[in-house]
Image (spheres, grey):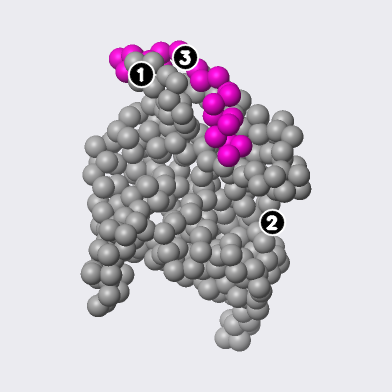
Amino acid sequence: MLGELHGAVQRIAANVERVLVGKPDVVRLALVALLAEGHLLVEDVPGVGKTSLAKALARSIDCTVSRVQFTPDLLPSDITGSSIYNRQENDFEFRPGPIFANIVVGDEINRASPKTQSALLECMEEHQVTVDANTYPLGSPFMVIATQNPIEMEGTYALPEAQRDRFTARVSIGYPDPAAELAMVDEHAGHNPLDDLRPVSDAAQVLRLIEAVRRVHLSPEVRRYAVELVSATRRLPELRLGASPRSTLHLVRAARAQAALAGRDFVVPDDIHAIAIPVLAHRLVMTAEAQAARRSPAELIRALLQRVPVPTAALDPSAAFVRSMNNNAGTPR
């Protein structure tokens, strides 16, 4: 199964990288979120490819896809759907909204009011929608990929903590290096590469890959390490709010996906280290003093990764993990 996962992920990543040039780490994190049954928040300045990443990933998988442009006048029913009176049947019938898709692209999510943003809370956590006391299950797989611009604040509403906590990971794309930008100009100036993108996987295969990730072994030592790392955020004096128990679940699920993408059927602490900042940093709420001192959540997570003891048990029967940890001893994380 890991062989199928590796081949499928390579095809999806190569397909997405035709659109998002020079950002393999960002594409990999998006795939980690997908295989961890999570949701992705893409946050960056305008023009770096936030929406292109979301649409390219959605088009690479032959699943149902919908896109919602969040605006200040958007209503919750515009997302979830609503009950419409059917005159022929003399009764109300439910008309599903765009949330009823496998991949939901929410563009500029922070432009909608908190009331509308809250329409996603039940969908993202419980994979269902409740309208007029009736509950409707969502399809599987289900993933929300939301984008937001952290620079332009006029006419926006900051995502509440409960909303941010439901995103498995947050990624910032960043500017491309000159070589990648030159390649982008050469390849994309004449046409939109999204127009030529074709699916390289389907819903059935994605579900098999998700099931394979669920079976990746998580030892008691690594499980305890993840809990200790998340618990340590709640004791930091620089934070008003540390990471939640939900973030612990998201951390270990993402670590399983990270291990599977590396071709392993077991998780090692390096998998936790690789995804700790994207999974945890956006959930932390800084104190005013820490913000004035220009401390960042990512900086605090890096410090914790160096302070929290790494388990030294031989988690890999071949002892490859122990050798790698000894070889990397003293290397900054």
- Residue 245 in the image: state x and y as whole percent: 64, 36
Give the residue number, with chain letter if any, for mark 1. Answer: 327
Task: Write down the region rendered in magenta.
Answer: 299-322
Residue appearing at x 31%, y 63% in the figure:
181
CA separation in Å, label 1 and label 3: 13 Å
- Whether residue 32 is situated above or below residue 140 in the rendered picture: above
**Image check: 77 left or right of 189?**
right
Residue 312, numbered circle: 3
Mark 3 neighbour density, 10 Å: few (under 14) some (14–19) many (20 or more): few
State whether residue 16 appears in this view: no
From the viewer's perspective, tell me whether residue 186 is left or right of residue 224: left
Q: Residue at x 30, y 33 (%)?
A: 263
Label pair 2/1, CB-CB below 8 angstroms: no
Please provide percent x and percent y for residue 41: 52, 55
Label 1, secondary structure: give it: helix
Mark 2 or 1, closer to the camera: 1
Mark 3: which amino acid? Answer: Thr
Any magenta on residue 244? no
Q: Please rate how many residues cluster around mark 1, counting C-alpha atoms within 10 Å: few if below 14, some from 14 to 19, many from 20.
A: few
Task: Quadrant for residue 110, please give it.
Answer: bottom right
The residue that appears at 61% across and 37% down in the rendered structure is: 300
* Quarter residue 54 falls in: bottom left
Alpha-carbon neighbours of circle 2 within 10 Å: few (<14), some, or many (≥20)?
few
Tag 2 residue: 160
